[in-house]
Amino acid sequence: MKPAALVAAVAALVAAACASARPDALRLVRVATFSSPVYATAAPGEPGNLYVVEQAGVIRVLSGGRTRSTPFLEIRPRVLSGGEQGLLSVAFAPDYARSRRFYVDYTDRNGDTRVVQYRSDGTKAIPSSAKQLLLVKDFAPNHNGGQLQFGPDGLLYWGNGDGGGGGDPQRNGQSLAKPFAKIMRLNVNAATPRWQLVAYGLRNPWRFSFDRANGDLYIGDVGQSAWEEIDYVPRGARTISNFGWNRFEGRHVYDSSTSLLGRGTYRAPVAEYPHSQGCSVTGGYVYRGKEVPSAVGRYFYGDYCSGTVWSLKIVRGKATGVRREPFTVGGLSSFGEDSGGELYLMSLDSGSLYRLAS
């Protein structure tokens, strides 16, 4: 080998070694395996536990790295599971350590959506404590949303898709008449709780989350045939948000015959990607953990079909530094957070639960 070629080869090897040792190089660590995991979260006051939702109607507890043999909740006889239906998420009340209240979203045996409050005895759910907070009669098996999250205001937020079918056949996206294509919230402590509109114009907000550091809202809204989008609402926004479906798919006109409703503020996506890179966005979280310092402040999201994972930062309301992460997760169903802000990813293909690491 000629000297110049030798120098170039050595330089390339050094560069490759440095790249592989970058402090910001991220990886995934497999933590456990479940049956069709679709969500994971923590309960206030339980720093060592992670609650994992299985689509068929079971919530299991991962405690100290091991899965407890007894489920926290088991409602399989009530749940219609498969495709986009099933037990889809759980949210624990901010005062769970005292009240023992938690909330689930699931598809019942008739194909309708229910949001139900339960109480636990501290170890498992009390079946007789079930109290229905919402029943939505559905007309199709898809676009069910299903995310539940407590916001920084202490209210329970719930997301639902446009009801199903292709292209929003019932025009629910730009209508306020039904609880489809919406994010709504509820004061669970009110004497007479009433759902309030937060956002509309969403095709299927399968996963949304709040940044635990500042309360900003991030939404992964699943597209129709060409574009997937990430939506963003800063904390303190004073108006209802309209995200444009089905007038728009991403930033692009989908149905020019649909006019945007004038109520609230239209918000275009802060990020999007075409179907050449995937087909169904899975929204995630802004990383606020301690194990991966280089990831702090970045919002992670991915695609169910391609398994690709990206991250970005929001600066002055705009996405910046969008990057593709160096790993994929086949059948990426959801992201989750533990009590310390560590980030988890889960796969419907393998049942694996992963933790973000460096």
Image (cartoon, rainbow, N blue to C red):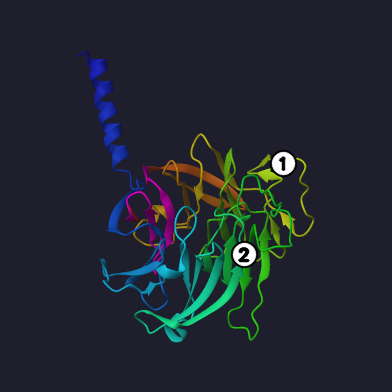
Tell me the residue at 56%/64% (across/down): 112
**Residue 85 placed where, x, y %?**
49, 58
Q: Is residue 13 above or below residue 65?
A: above
Measured in 3D between alpha carbons, the distance from the residue under mark 1 to the one under mark 2, in whole angstroms, is 26 Å
**Residue 315 placed where, x, y %?**
58, 52
Tell me the residue at 54%/71% (across/down): 115
Q: Is residue 32 left or right of residue 51?
A: left
Q: Is residue 154 visible?
A: no
Which of the numbered marks, if any, corresponds to residue 137?
A: 2
State the extent of the magenta-drawn residues as a range: 327-353
Which of the numbered marks, if any, corresponds to residue 255?
A: 1
Q: Secondary structure at mark 2?
A: loop
Q: Is residue 18 above or below residue 149?
A: above
Given the image, on which type of amino acid does mark 2 rest?
Answer: Lys
Residue 230 lies in the magenta-colored region? no
Q: Cβ–Cβ below 8 Å for labels 1 and 2?
A: no
**Residue 43 placed where, x, y %?**
41, 74
Label total for image: 2
Q: Is residue 92 visible?
A: yes
Q: Secondary structure at mark 1?
A: loop
Task: State which quadrant residue 141 falls in.
Answer: bottom right
Q: Is residue 240 left or right of residue 288?
A: right
Which of the numbered marks, if any, corresponds to residue 326?
A: none
Front: mark 1 or 2:
2
Tell me the residue at 25%/23% (across/down): 9
